[in-house]
Image (cartoon, rainbow, N blue to C red):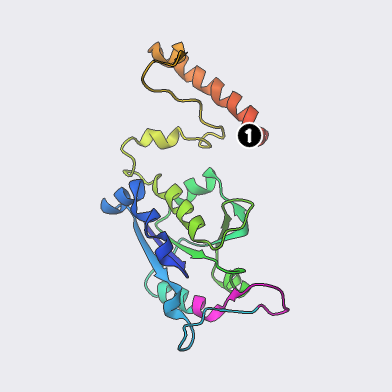
Amino acid sequence: MQIDIISVLPEMMESPLSQSIVQRARQKGLVQINLIGLREFGLGAYKQLDDYPYGGGGGMVLRVEPLAACIEHLLQQQTYDEIIYLTPDGEQLNQKTVNSLSTKNNLLLICGHYKGIDQRIRDKYVTCEISIGDYVLSGGEIAACVLADAIVRLIPGVLSDEMSALSDSFQDGLLAPPVYTRPEIWEGRSVPEVLISGHEKRIAEWRLEESIARTRKRRPDLLDE
């Protein structure tokens, strides 16, 4: 898989995307992540990227020309399955979307900045708009890291235990059940007996019951869905 990310501040993403599981995936050649600095396509001697919004109001907007030039430059080299804009007014990210995107070959992510990007870019190029939650960040860089991490860990071969990803929260529409490890007793608190029984059917039943109970308590909206 190839993930290209357009950003005003590409250096902001270098560390998060060069650690842990994502780093190992890149080293194995399972994913290629390219950070593209939008400043290279800025206008004039000062490489201008933003301007005041038509109609007035606070904040600045990323201009259409630099973004269009950057996207067209990339399209000359690559065909993308999805061109994704990270924005607070996009469709809220969930595991179903992540699962779908993890099956793609080439993705282009656009990080917004300031008050966002010129709507004409969204109209012409963007095929998918994603929000990571009902709040506003300074830019789309953190959201892009979240999305990339969620996708990469699902690529076959990335996790040493691929069953681990399949048992994560939200994969079956439920929150994951409680998990325990050694020691068996800690400060008088014991691991549930069923988990050390070795009875696979009973353990599976317990985990499902706990998942449903935890989901009902913390995210009843998931059960409604």
Q: Position of residue 197 (x, y in %)?
A: 40, 10
Q: Does any portion of residue 103 appear in the rendered image?
A: no
Q: Which residue is mark 1?
A: 219
- The answer to if 55 sits in the magenta stretch is yes
In the rendered structure, the answer to whether residue 149 lies left or right of residue 19 reads: right
Q: Position of residue 96 (x, y in %)?
A: 53, 44
* Residue reaching furthest to the left: 28
Say which of 182 and 165 sits in front. 182
Q: Does any portion of residue 84 appear in the rendered image?
A: yes
Q: Residue at x 59, y 27 (%)?
A: 214
Q: Which residues are magenta?
A: 53-68
Q: Residue at x 51, y 56 (%)?
A: 143
Residue type at mark 1? Arg
**Location of residue 123 by image quarter:** bottom right
Q: Position of residue 45 (x, y in %)?
A: 45, 89
Q: Position of residue 2 (x, y in %)?
A: 37, 59
Say which of 100 and 68 sits in front. 68
Quadrant for the C terminus in the image: top right
Q: Label 1: state its secondary structure.
A: loop
Please tell me whether residue 87 is drawn above or below residue 165 in the rendered image.
below
